[in-house]
Amino acid sequence: MLLPAVDKRLKTGFVPKGINLIEQCNEIAASRDSRIPTSAAGNLPEESAEASLCVPERKLPRIIAFAATTGDQALVSLSNFGVTIVVGRILGPEGFGIFTLVWSVALFLNVVQQSFFVAPMLTLSSKYVGNERSKYFGSVLALQSTFAISSIILLVLGFALGVLCGLFSPDVKQAILPLACACFFYQMQEFIRRMLQATARPVAALLCDVTTYGLQIAMLSWLLLNKQAGMATIFWMLAGTWMAGCVFFLAVQGQIEISKAAVTMAMGVHFSFGGSLALANLFMWFSGYGSLYAVAAQLSPAAVGNIRAAMNVVAPFNVLAVGIQIFLSIEAAQVYRLHGMQAMTRLLRNYAVGFMLVCVPLGLVLWIWARPLVRTLLGSRFEVPASWIVGQFVAVTAFALFGFLMVHFKTIERNYYTALAAGGGMLLALTLTTMLVRPLGAGAVFVGLVAGQTGAIVCAGWFWLKSIRGQELG
């Protein structure tokens, strides 16, 4: 049990010189143990845990952190929404489809990054205090940088081999180097914004993204007005704006220490934590992009461009849901360690119910305005039925609910449950999509995605019930 005064120092990492924090914890706890009832497991009882979650001195910082984190995610969501609209207008359905397939490489690398660096950092960073905390973040930054450099080298070599084998069109050949630069700076900017959030600096993360995505929208709008941009030019522009975000981080970063021993220890902890999580994220990536590859192989890149246009209409909602999950990854870890399973379950359940209450009216609005919205945003060249957008909205809602279960499993370190559920969903999604592409056309993708996410939720829900009943927690 950590008392408020000590808990505050643990969160900030500040310990006055000359004070032994462990001794102070023991002394304060010993002096109050007789006045604070505890459960047999040593946690606060349910009433006491719930009350401590609403302590006024913690309530305002939590509100600010939640507002900054979700506001940051909303900014990124709207910016990505605007970027894909502008890119779609510049390149048209076929060029946009090729762009989507090429950029899927960067999103694949992002899956690995999220699994082994970002997600473990958000969950495990609360274990470190004081000097160990700065060493931990320095170690994770070193690991992320090494991965980013290595992956880009492999990316360039892989694309060069494809060029020698005659697999790529001239547009793709010209985009290899700018694509590599965009992938590198995208990884680094995405990581540092999450690190700023994990170090309790969500406002700095928000300003970092304002700098990055403000420049991105401005430069892409300029390219749209000139109407002479190709895929390579777009990738160069994206690389430059993400690099600006990295420069912003260098200006605001706090004290970070890097030591070989700390890097080795962090690597072991993160790879142990992220193994099952990486499988789950890769299964979800293959569920989505595997379906697009199947459509591209059986239909055309233009069909992929139309599918991506439908996904883009719902994308802001999806990224906002991810922002809520990022906030909950940090909050749930703290609540679980301080107050136990019941308090964490109650926290996640409340957010899930609130999320669903927002989904219902939003879904109705999308149903009514789907086709006019697509024509207004992307123009008449794209053919997107309203049923596609509604199907994507249902799939995104299901994915968000699955994300709440993912946070639960990450916090109790049972990521293999997430992997098993995501694997089942992937098999169902890819099987249905492949079977239905011929009779249904590109719309088969959305049938497969909804079915796959539903199957994943059913499987994960069963594991969730099993975990909260204590069958796996011992």
Image (spheres, grey):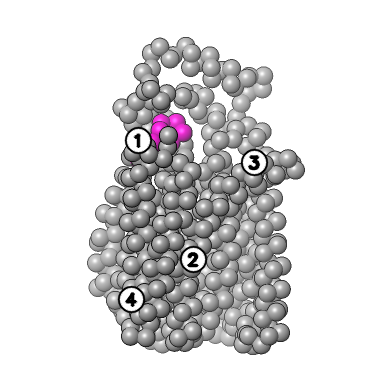
Q: Earlier in the sequence, mark 1 or mark 2?
A: 2
| Between marks 2 and 4 in the image, the one whose residue lies nearer the viewer | 2
Q: Earlier in the sequence, mark 3 or mark 4?
A: 3
Q: Which residue is mark 4?
A: 388
Q: Which residue is mark 3?
A: 136
Query: Mark 3: which secondary structure?
Result: helix
| Between marks 2 and 3 in the image, the one whose residue lies nearer the viewer | 2
Query: Mark 4: which secondary structure?
Result: helix
Instruction: For the C terminus, give its image quadrant.
Output: top left
Task: Specify the label residue 144 is tagged with.
Answer: none
Whole-percent x, y for residue 293 in the image: 49, 78
Q: Residue at x 70, y 40 (%)?
A: 262
- The amino acid sitting under disc 2 is Trp
- The amino acid sitting under disc 4 is Trp
- Within 10 Å of disc 1 (Cα), the crowding (few <14, some 14-19, many 20+) is some
Q: Which residue is mark 2?
A: 285
Q: Earlier in the sequence, mark 2 or mark 3?
A: 3
Residue 342 is a magenta residue: yes
Q: Earlier in the sequence, mark 4 or mark 1?
A: 1
- Within 10 Å of disc 3 (Cα), the crowding (few <14, some 14-19, many 20+) is many
Q: Residue at x 67, y 64 (%)?
A: 151
Q: CA distance from mark 3 to mark 4?
A: 44 Å
Q: Earlier in the sequence, mark 2 or mark 4?
A: 2
In front: 450, or 360? 450
Q: CA distance from mark 4 to mark 1?
A: 39 Å
- The amino acid sitting under disc 1 is Gln
Q: Which residue is mark 1?
A: 342
Q: Residue at x 63, y 32 (%)?
A: 130
For the record, the magenta segment spans 335-345
